[in-house]
């Protein structure tokens, strides 16, 4: 049975601009009879929207609906999704699983990988991640020479955020959303507001980059980022 | 003069597999009359080799030769390279500057950006970075859920490396090269050898992934990486 099973491709489709798809992800996407992608409980899938122009009518689509505030444990959702993918793989169909940004940089792919990797051949195609996309949008090097970088979610408490900010040359705070006021306050206390840039919707037509002073805390989306570069400030950046 | 100046494109060309070029980098590369890239003092440019199949005979090429052990200060090298690019930009020529991996994730682009950004229009096109490429090669998620990631160069001393390993859920140690024995020893002392994977030449035909026990310390290249994931170990990986 396994000898004829399909292969699963975890395709990083990049941060949002459809042109930031890699040639390899495009080739594997177009060749796959089945295309799966994460989606909210209702409404459209961001990952799918990135590659929508390349999808063909004959491809079977499997949205993996992950509620933002799940009523059932996330494990049950991933179990069900893995079962649905298993059905296709056992039929011998290759499945392209779309991953916003990069498959192994946050996101839900890791949960499905954990459930399927022991039974099926999986290839992960790395994609352009949100941190490099945000650095490009902000015209700010992430790291140079022997600098250190910390990537931390804004869900950490103030003490933990402050510690990373003190110890790292460069920090990317991801998943900012409703945690913006806490992060803003921490940066102010450390005197780092002038080194921080806020980025939302990087690489999309509505991309927005600003200082933290210009951000409306009530409107910060979950997929926003704050980049702080502490040393080696580059001349000529905004 | 500036009104007709060319534009500089910092193109991330990905970690090595020519298919990991983005559609956008390919479009801008092919449209550029001038293509510049870092290269060693003698021999071929890795960044150029990634896109070699796409280069056309009519494109003027500018290798930016950066000695591995420079006799003159690196600043003088970047000053000279910036002057050479300036000549092309003042002629009105757009210049595609190739960057291995991502333009703002280590690498020399930041130094040229610092010298040219105040005078010319520069667009940075983010690329697939080595950390996501290595995670894919090692079949290891970099970060999931609310995990933290530290990216550190192997040049740090043992104490600093150990501190990051204790405080982060996931650590990417870059530029390993001759520092391998120090890193190995630090990981052993922390009991983290089983959580570590060594990766060299990610995404290239000679890609090699192994446990640290199988690495010959005398043959570790500069562009190698060690990934350590401390918690949330994924079942079924390898």
Image (tube, coloured by chain):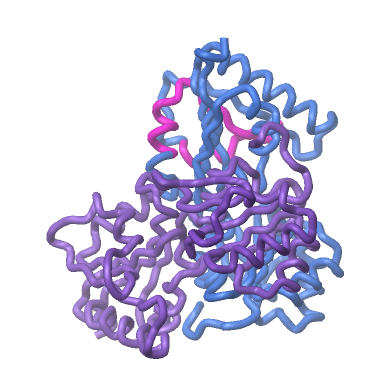
Chain colours: A purple, B blue
Answer above or below: position of A100 versus B147.
above
B129 relative to A159, above or below: above
Q: Which residue is more in the foreground, A175 or B73?
A: A175
Q: Is residue B87 rendered to the left or right of residue B162?
A: left
Q: Residue at x 50, y 56 (%)?
A: A129
Locate residue A2 relative to residue B234 in the image: left or right. left
Q: B15 or B22: which is nearer to us?
A: B22
Identify the residue at image location x=58%, y=45%. Answer: A210
The magenta segment is B25-51
Viewer-side residue, B222 vs B8? B8
Choose top left, top right, bottom left or bottom right for residue B66.
top right
B26 inside magenta stretch: yes
B197 on left or right of B167:
left
Residue B172 appears at what percent x and percent y?
66, 65
Q: Position of residue A65 (x, y in %)?
A: 31, 76
Q: Quadrant of the N terminus of chain A?
A: bottom left
Find the residue positioned furthest to the left: A58
Q: Is residue B99 visible?
A: yes
Q: Quadrant of the C terminus of chain A?
A: top right
Q: Is residue A45 magenta?
A: no
Relative height, residue B154 to residue A89 (above, below): above
Query: Residue placed at 75% from the left, 84% from the top?
Result: B191
């Amino acid at each position: 049975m396994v000898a004829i099973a399909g292969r699963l491709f975890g395709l990083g489709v990049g941060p949002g601009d459809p042109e930031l798809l890699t040639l390899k992800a495009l080739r594997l996407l177009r060749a796959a009879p089945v295309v799966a992608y994460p989606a909210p409980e209702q409404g459209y899938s961001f990952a799918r929207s990135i590659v929508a122009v390349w999808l063909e009518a004959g491809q079977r689509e499997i949205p993996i609906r992950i509620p933002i505030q799940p009523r059932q444990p996330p494990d049950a959702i991933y179990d069900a999704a893995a079962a649905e993918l298993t059905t296709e793989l056992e039929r011998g169909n290759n499945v392209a699983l779309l991953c916003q940004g990069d498959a192994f940089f946050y996101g839900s792919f890791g949960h499905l990988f954990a459930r399927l990797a022991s039974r099926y051949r999986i290839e992960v195609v790395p994609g352009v991640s949100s941190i490099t996309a945000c650095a490009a949008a902000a015209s700010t090097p992430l790291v140079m020479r022997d600098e250190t970088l910390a990537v931390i979610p804004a869900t950490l408490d103030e003490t933990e955020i402050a510690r990373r900010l003190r110890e790292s040359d460069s920090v990317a705070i991801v998943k900012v959303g409703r945690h913006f006021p806490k992060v803003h306050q921490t940066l102010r206390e450390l005197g780092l507001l002038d080194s921080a840039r806020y980025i939302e919707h990087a690489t999309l037509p509505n991309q927005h980059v600003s200082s933290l002073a210009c951000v409306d805390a009530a409107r910060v989306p979950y997929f926003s980022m704050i980049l702080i570069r502490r040393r080696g400030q580059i001349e000529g950046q905004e």
